[in-house]
Amino acid sequence: MTHSNSYTHTGKISKFTAIFMPLVFLIIGLATGFFAGYQGYNYLAFKNISTETTAQIIDINSDETREQISFTVDDKEYIVTLSYYSSTDYIGKEITILYETANPYHVKAQGGEFILIGVFGGIGVLFILIGGSMLITLLISESKKKRLKSTGRMIWCTVDQIYVNTRIAVNRINPFVIIAKNSVGATYKSPNIFDDLSNIAPGDRIAVYVNMNKEKEFYIDYSQISKNTSVNDSSINNPTSNDSSYSSLSSSFMDDNK
Protein backbone atom coordinates (compact mmCIF):
# COMPACT_ATOMS: atom_id res chain seq x y z
CA MET A 1 0.00 0.00 0.00
CA THR A 2 1.27 3.42 -0.85
CA HIS A 3 0.44 6.92 0.22
CA SER A 4 1.60 10.02 -1.60
CA ASN A 5 3.00 12.73 0.65
CA SER A 6 3.13 15.35 -2.11
CA TYR A 7 0.54 17.55 -0.42
CA THR A 8 2.52 20.65 -1.41
CA HIS A 9 1.48 20.02 -5.00
CA THR A 10 -2.19 19.95 -4.17
CA GLY A 11 -4.76 22.24 -2.72
CA LYS A 12 -8.45 22.54 -2.15
CA ILE A 13 -11.01 23.68 -4.68
CA SER A 14 -14.23 24.64 -2.92
CA LYS A 15 -17.67 23.65 -4.11
CA PHE A 16 -18.23 27.32 -4.93
CA THR A 17 -15.18 27.26 -7.22
CA ALA A 18 -16.33 24.01 -8.82
CA ILE A 19 -19.64 25.67 -9.72
CA PHE A 20 -18.11 29.08 -10.49
CA MET A 21 -15.65 27.74 -13.09
CA PRO A 22 -18.26 26.38 -15.54
CA LEU A 23 -20.31 29.54 -15.03
CA VAL A 24 -17.27 31.62 -16.04
CA PHE A 25 -16.95 29.56 -19.23
CA LEU A 26 -20.65 30.03 -19.94
CA ILE A 27 -20.51 33.79 -19.34
CA ILE A 28 -17.45 34.21 -21.58
CA GLY A 29 -19.06 32.04 -24.26
CA LEU A 30 -22.33 33.95 -24.14
CA ALA A 31 -20.51 37.31 -24.20
CA THR A 32 -18.34 36.44 -27.20
CA GLY A 33 -21.31 34.83 -28.94
CA PHE A 34 -23.38 37.96 -28.35
CA PHE A 35 -20.55 40.11 -29.72
CA ALA A 36 -20.32 37.93 -32.85
CA GLY A 37 -24.09 38.11 -33.31
CA TYR A 38 -24.09 41.86 -32.81
CA GLN A 39 -21.33 42.28 -35.41
CA GLY A 40 -23.23 40.06 -37.82
CA TYR A 41 -26.41 42.06 -37.32
CA ASN A 42 -24.57 45.35 -37.92
CA TYR A 43 -22.96 43.98 -41.08
CA LEU A 44 -26.28 42.84 -42.51
CA ALA A 45 -27.88 46.17 -41.61
CA PHE A 46 -25.03 48.03 -43.31
CA LYS A 47 -25.31 45.83 -46.38
CA ASN A 48 -28.94 46.87 -46.80
CA ILE A 49 -28.00 50.56 -47.12
CA SER A 50 -24.77 50.13 -49.09
CA THR A 51 -23.55 49.69 -52.64
CA GLU A 52 -20.95 47.26 -53.86
CA THR A 53 -17.98 48.47 -55.89
CA THR A 54 -14.32 47.78 -56.61
CA ALA A 55 -11.51 49.65 -54.86
CA GLN A 56 -7.75 49.63 -55.24
CA ILE A 57 -5.30 49.32 -52.35
CA ILE A 58 -2.94 52.31 -52.35
CA ASP A 59 -1.21 51.82 -48.99
CA ILE A 60 -0.84 49.12 -46.33
CA ASN A 61 0.07 49.44 -42.66
CA SER A 62 0.35 45.86 -41.47
CA ASP A 63 1.49 46.92 -37.99
CA GLU A 64 -1.79 48.70 -37.38
CA THR A 65 -3.78 46.25 -39.56
CA ARG A 66 -5.02 49.05 -41.78
CA GLU A 67 -5.31 49.47 -45.53
CA GLN A 68 -5.87 52.65 -47.49
CA ILE A 69 -8.05 52.28 -50.55
CA SER A 70 -9.18 54.42 -53.45
CA PHE A 71 -12.46 54.11 -55.35
CA THR A 72 -14.70 56.26 -57.52
CA VAL A 73 -18.38 57.09 -57.11
CA ASP A 74 -20.09 59.29 -59.71
CA ASP A 75 -16.72 60.40 -61.10
CA LYS A 76 -15.53 61.46 -57.64
CA GLU A 77 -12.52 59.76 -56.08
CA TYR A 78 -12.71 58.71 -52.44
CA ILE A 79 -9.68 57.72 -50.37
CA VAL A 80 -10.59 55.83 -47.20
CA THR A 81 -8.62 53.94 -44.56
CA LEU A 82 -10.04 50.54 -43.68
CA SER A 83 -9.58 48.95 -40.24
CA TYR A 84 -8.86 45.76 -42.09
CA TYR A 85 -5.78 43.88 -43.25
CA SER A 86 -5.16 40.61 -45.06
CA SER A 87 -1.73 39.06 -45.48
CA THR A 88 -2.63 38.23 -49.09
CA ASP A 89 -3.24 41.89 -49.96
CA TYR A 90 -0.71 44.14 -51.65
CA ILE A 91 -0.52 47.67 -53.02
CA GLY A 92 -2.31 47.84 -56.35
CA LYS A 93 -4.61 44.92 -55.65
CA GLU A 94 -8.29 45.41 -56.35
CA ILE A 95 -10.76 44.36 -53.67
CA THR A 96 -14.54 44.40 -53.40
CA ILE A 97 -15.99 46.83 -50.89
CA LEU A 98 -19.34 48.05 -49.65
CA TYR A 99 -19.87 51.78 -49.18
CA GLU A 100 -22.85 53.47 -47.63
CA THR A 101 -24.87 54.88 -50.52
CA ALA A 102 -25.64 58.12 -48.68
CA ASN A 103 -22.10 58.47 -47.32
CA PRO A 104 -19.35 56.88 -49.47
CA TYR A 105 -16.76 57.57 -46.78
CA HIS A 106 -18.40 54.87 -44.67
CA VAL A 107 -16.82 51.72 -46.11
CA LYS A 108 -16.43 48.06 -45.21
CA ALA A 109 -14.42 45.37 -46.97
CA GLN A 110 -16.86 42.81 -48.28
CA GLY A 111 -16.49 39.63 -46.23
CA GLY A 112 -14.00 41.25 -43.88
CA GLU A 113 -16.48 41.22 -41.00
CA PHE A 114 -17.04 37.49 -41.44
CA ILE A 115 -13.52 36.72 -40.20
CA LEU A 116 -14.18 38.55 -36.93
CA ILE A 117 -17.65 37.06 -36.62
CA GLY A 118 -16.34 33.56 -37.29
CA VAL A 119 -13.51 33.82 -34.75
CA PHE A 120 -15.64 35.22 -31.93
CA GLY A 121 -18.58 33.00 -32.81
CA GLY A 122 -16.37 29.90 -32.73
CA ILE A 123 -14.83 30.89 -29.40
CA GLY A 124 -18.30 31.55 -27.99
CA VAL A 125 -19.64 28.15 -29.02
CA LEU A 126 -16.54 26.39 -27.67
CA PHE A 127 -16.76 28.08 -24.27
CA ILE A 128 -20.50 27.44 -24.03
CA LEU A 129 -19.97 23.75 -24.79
CA ILE A 130 -17.16 23.44 -22.23
CA GLY A 131 -19.00 25.36 -19.51
CA GLY A 132 -22.29 23.64 -20.21
CA SER A 133 -20.80 20.15 -20.13
CA MET A 134 -18.93 20.94 -16.89
CA LEU A 135 -22.08 22.26 -15.22
CA ILE A 136 -24.27 19.39 -16.42
CA THR A 137 -21.68 16.84 -15.27
CA LEU A 138 -21.46 18.51 -11.88
CA LEU A 139 -25.24 18.59 -11.43
CA ILE A 140 -25.64 14.97 -12.50
CA SER A 141 -22.80 13.91 -10.19
CA GLU A 142 -24.29 15.76 -7.23
CA SER A 143 -27.67 14.18 -7.89
CA LYS A 144 -26.14 10.72 -8.21
CA LYS A 145 -24.12 11.18 -5.02
CA LYS A 146 -27.25 12.13 -3.05
CA ARG A 147 -29.16 9.20 -4.52
CA LEU A 148 -26.44 6.70 -3.67
CA LYS A 149 -26.13 8.00 -0.11
CA SER A 150 -29.91 7.74 0.23
CA THR A 151 -30.63 4.39 -1.45
CA GLY A 152 -27.24 2.68 -1.82
CA ARG A 153 -25.70 0.20 0.60
CA MET A 154 -22.86 1.53 2.70
CA ILE A 155 -19.79 -0.70 2.81
CA TRP A 156 -16.77 -0.12 5.00
CA CYS A 157 -13.70 -0.57 2.82
CA THR A 158 -9.98 -0.27 3.45
CA VAL A 159 -8.02 2.58 1.88
CA ASP A 160 -5.42 0.85 -0.28
CA GLN A 161 -3.80 3.84 -2.01
CA ILE A 162 -3.93 7.61 -2.13
CA TYR A 163 -2.00 9.24 -4.93
CA VAL A 164 -1.71 12.57 -6.70
CA ASN A 165 -2.95 12.65 -10.29
CA THR A 166 -0.24 14.78 -11.88
CA ARG A 167 -1.85 14.49 -15.32
CA ILE A 168 -4.58 16.92 -14.31
CA ALA A 169 -4.23 20.39 -12.82
CA VAL A 170 -6.80 23.10 -12.13
CA ASN A 171 -5.34 26.45 -11.09
CA ARG A 172 -2.03 24.58 -10.71
CA ILE A 173 -3.66 22.22 -8.22
CA ASN A 174 -3.34 18.46 -8.73
CA PRO A 175 -6.16 16.27 -7.42
CA PHE A 176 -6.00 13.17 -5.25
CA VAL A 177 -7.34 9.74 -6.15
CA ILE A 178 -8.39 7.17 -3.55
CA ILE A 179 -8.34 3.43 -4.18
CA ALA A 180 -10.22 1.33 -1.64
CA LYS A 181 -10.93 -2.39 -1.32
CA ASN A 182 -13.61 -4.33 0.49
CA SER A 183 -13.16 -7.62 2.32
CA VAL A 184 -13.77 -9.74 -0.79
CA GLY A 185 -11.27 -7.86 -2.95
CA ALA A 186 -13.58 -5.58 -4.94
CA THR A 187 -11.71 -2.38 -5.80
CA TYR A 188 -13.25 1.08 -5.85
CA LYS A 189 -11.47 4.04 -7.42
CA SER A 190 -12.57 7.59 -6.73
CA PRO A 191 -12.73 10.37 -9.28
CA ASN A 192 -10.33 13.30 -8.94
CA ILE A 193 -10.67 14.87 -5.48
CA PHE A 194 -9.55 18.44 -4.93
CA ASP A 195 -10.16 18.46 -1.17
CA ASP A 196 -7.48 18.11 1.50
CA LEU A 197 -7.02 14.40 2.30
CA SER A 198 -4.13 14.77 4.74
CA ASN A 199 -6.30 13.15 7.44
CA ILE A 200 -6.61 9.91 5.42
CA ALA A 201 -3.93 7.23 5.13
CA PRO A 202 -3.72 3.69 3.74
CA GLY A 203 -5.22 1.22 6.15
CA ASP A 204 -8.01 3.57 7.25
CA ARG A 205 -11.58 2.43 6.85
CA ILE A 206 -13.67 4.50 4.43
CA ALA A 207 -17.38 4.45 3.61
CA VAL A 208 -18.40 3.43 0.09
CA TYR A 209 -22.02 3.62 -1.03
CA VAL A 210 -22.83 0.99 -3.67
CA ASN A 211 -25.84 0.49 -5.90
CA MET A 212 -26.35 -3.24 -5.33
CA ASN A 213 -28.34 -3.48 -8.57
CA LYS A 214 -25.48 -1.90 -10.49
CA GLU A 215 -22.32 -2.48 -8.49
CA LYS A 216 -20.08 -0.43 -10.75
CA GLU A 217 -22.06 2.60 -9.62
CA PHE A 218 -20.75 3.79 -6.28
CA TYR A 219 -19.65 6.80 -4.26
CA ILE A 220 -16.59 6.94 -2.01
CA ASP A 221 -17.54 9.16 0.91
CA TYR A 222 -14.17 10.40 2.14
CA SER A 223 -15.91 12.43 4.85
CA GLN A 224 -16.63 9.15 6.66
CA ILE A 225 -13.32 7.77 7.86
CA SER A 226 -12.59 5.35 10.69
CA LYS A 227 -9.14 4.76 12.14
CA ASN A 228 -10.52 1.62 13.76
CA THR A 229 -9.36 -1.16 11.46
CA SER A 230 -11.64 -3.64 13.25
CA VAL A 231 -14.67 -2.02 11.60
CA ASN A 232 -15.94 -4.58 9.10
CA ASP A 233 -18.07 -4.29 6.02
CA SER A 234 -20.93 -6.26 7.54
CA SER A 235 -23.33 -4.70 5.08
CA ILE A 236 -22.05 -7.03 2.34
CA ASN A 237 -24.40 -9.96 2.04
CA ASN A 238 -23.94 -12.75 -0.50
CA PRO A 239 -21.51 -10.88 -2.79
CA THR A 240 -21.86 -11.76 -6.44
CA SER A 241 -19.13 -12.77 -8.85
CA ASN A 242 -18.90 -9.15 -9.93
CA ASP A 243 -17.58 -8.15 -6.50
CA SER A 244 -14.01 -9.06 -7.46
CA SER A 245 -14.02 -6.98 -10.61
CA TYR A 246 -12.20 -3.67 -10.85
CA SER A 247 -14.60 -0.78 -10.72
CA SER A 248 -13.72 2.81 -11.43
CA LEU A 249 -15.29 6.17 -11.92
CA SER A 250 -14.32 8.50 -14.72
CA SER A 251 -12.34 11.59 -13.69
CA SER A 252 -14.49 14.59 -12.77
CA PHE A 253 -15.13 16.79 -9.77
CA MET A 254 -17.73 14.34 -8.46
CA ASP A 255 -18.87 10.76 -9.21
CA ASP A 256 -20.13 10.55 -12.76
CA ASN A 257 -20.56 6.84 -13.53
CA LYS A 258 -23.74 5.95 -15.27
Image (cartoon, grey):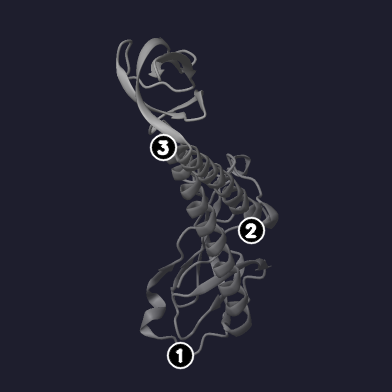
Labels 1, 3: front one: 3
- What amino acid is labelled 2 in the image? Ile
Labels 3, 2: front one: 3
Camera-side residue: 231 or 50?
50
Q: Which residue is mark 3?
A: 114
Placement of 215 over or under 72, stated as above or below: below
Q: Which residue is mark 2?
A: 200
In the current view of this chain or complex, which residue is farthest to the bottom?
238
User: SS of the residue at dot 1?
Assistant: loop
User: SS of the residue at dot 2?
Assistant: loop
Placement of 98 over or under 24, stated as above or below: above
- What amino acid is labelled 1 in the image? Asn
Q: Residues within 10 Å of mark 3 (few under 14, many from 20)?
A: some
Camera-side residue: 214 or 202?
214
Question: Mark 1 touching mark 3, by CB under 8 A?
Answer: no
Query: In the rendering, at what x and y percent does residue 120 appear?
Result: 48, 40
Query: In the rendering, at what x and y percent does residue 36 appear?
Result: 51, 42
